[in-house]
Amino acid sequence: MTKKADETVKNNLKAVPEIDNQPSPEVAPPPALEVIHRPGLEKVVAVRSTISCVDGNKGILEYRGINIADLVRYSSFEETIFLLLYNHLPNEREMMQFNTLIAKQRGLPASVRDAISNYPVGMHPINALQSAIILLSGEDFYADDVSSPQHNIRRCISLIAKAPTIIAAFERARHGEQPMPAVTKYTMAENFIFMLTGEPCPPEIGRFFDKLLILHAEHTMNASTFAARVIGSTHGSVYSAISGAVGALSGPLHGGANERVLRMLYSIGHPDNVDKFLDEMITTKTKIMGIGHRVYNVKDPRAVLIQDFMKNLLEIVPGEGRKNLYQTALKLEEKAKERLSHKGLHPNVDFYSGIVLDALRVPGDLFTPVFAISRVAGWCAHWLEQIGANRLFRPLQEYIGDHKRHYIPIEDR
Ligand SMILES: CC(C)(COP(=O)(O)OP(=O)(O)OC[C@H]1O[C@@H](n2cnc3c(N)ncnc32)[C@H](O)[C@@H]1OP(=O)(O)O)[C@@H](O)C(=O)NCCC(=O)NCCS
């Protein structure tokens, strides 16, 4: 350092006030925060967000301010992803570029593809998804550096594009089949069905699947989204955040319900058996899958929309068994309404989605992974929002254990 520069540094340092740890007598201490405990964080506002909004009394869900009924009617899953990530609808050029970008990102690195082909066949596909997502971080040398918004959004797009490929590859691997290569000319919905079944997906079937993906893409501060944001708040990588969110989604009280709804409907077997089934569930205080929601006091708008297009789907997909399943679900909804709606219990998104997925020939244990491959879009939007204006999550606990216990040597216990 030159003499002049040294002088300047010294002068600048003189200008920095000395640290005074003593509280100034004139400044009043901040008021003590009211400490409250709400089990399950019920009615606690954990974040401020512009991504989606639920009106649980009116049964309205909006993504970035747009009603999901409009998105299901006019949009596509790709456009919905764009909307969630960028907070505006794309113009034609942006849409074209985004479609190309996302289609090009579908392939898996060889290391991850090989790992999936060696996963235990008994593994639940949702766990395969969770594990393969974290493996992808091994192919991203700078995965832990979350400082560049451009790189972060690229990573999100890549993950959203790859999640369906992971599930399709695992499904084929566990049946001893080679993965199908992704086809860029197909939409995400058509490509997933193609990679799963090995057969081109008729566009009208792809459109039903597309609608289902739109409806699952985002849903405010649920357990899995919260998990993604908590991990994001530590500046954990997008791979950690999304794989953590997949883990949170897997439980039966969250995304795992759709698979169980279908099993339940099959076990009921026929609309005539609904009364007996419901009696049993109510007497034994057993929860009926696909019913109830923490934020809706009315029927979940996604259930209404799924039910709406499901009728059309069942007309073009043959199968008396499925029609019987639908009739059973309708009767269960009607009877549950008579007996449980006073508790604010109504069908949620999972109540009818299983019937749609069954009609699309998606195996039962892939229902929750399908939910996840759509929700990666919402989780990514939340991860980006969290790291964009971060505050580390660090709630309190209320300690209700003992104090001042004596340590007793092991020989005296
Ligand atoms: C989603 C869910 C966890 C929300 O639950 P919650 O807000 O924590 O509500 P609670 O579990 O405290 O239930 C409140 C009351 O409704 C009852 N209830 C809630 N869901 C019920 C269901 N699916 N079937 C029957 N009764 C139900 C509870 O037994 C409780 O009754 P009580 O007051 O007489 O004890 C719950 O409705 C549920 O487990 N549903 C089934 C699983 C499911 O479909 N999950 C997907 C959600 S999208």
Image (cartoon, rainbow, N blue to C red):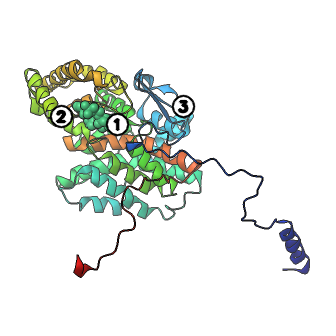
Residue 197 in view: yes
State yes or no: Cβ of the residue under disc 2 lies below 8 Å from any atom of ligand 1: yes
Q: Quadrant of residue 213?
A: top left
Residue pointed to by mark 1: 189
Image-quarter location of ligand 1: top left
Say which element carries label 3.
loop
**211, 412: nearer the viewer:** 412
> What is the x, y in percent for residue 156?
47, 49
- Residue found at x 28% / y 80%: 409
Q: Label for residue 24?
A: none
Residue pointed to by mark 3: 89
Three-letter residue code for mark 1: Ala
How far apart are labels 1 and 2 at the CA level? 39 Å
> What is the x, y in percent for residue 204?
30, 26
Marks 2/3 in contact by CB < 8 Å: the verdict is no
Q: Is residue 179 above or below residue 221?
A: below
Q: Mark 1 or mark 2, which has the lower sequence index?
A: 1
Three-letter residue code for mark 2: Lys
> What is the x, y in percent for residue 218?
42, 37
Judge the density around disc 1: few (<14), some (14-19), many (≥20) Cα neighbours within 10 Å.
many
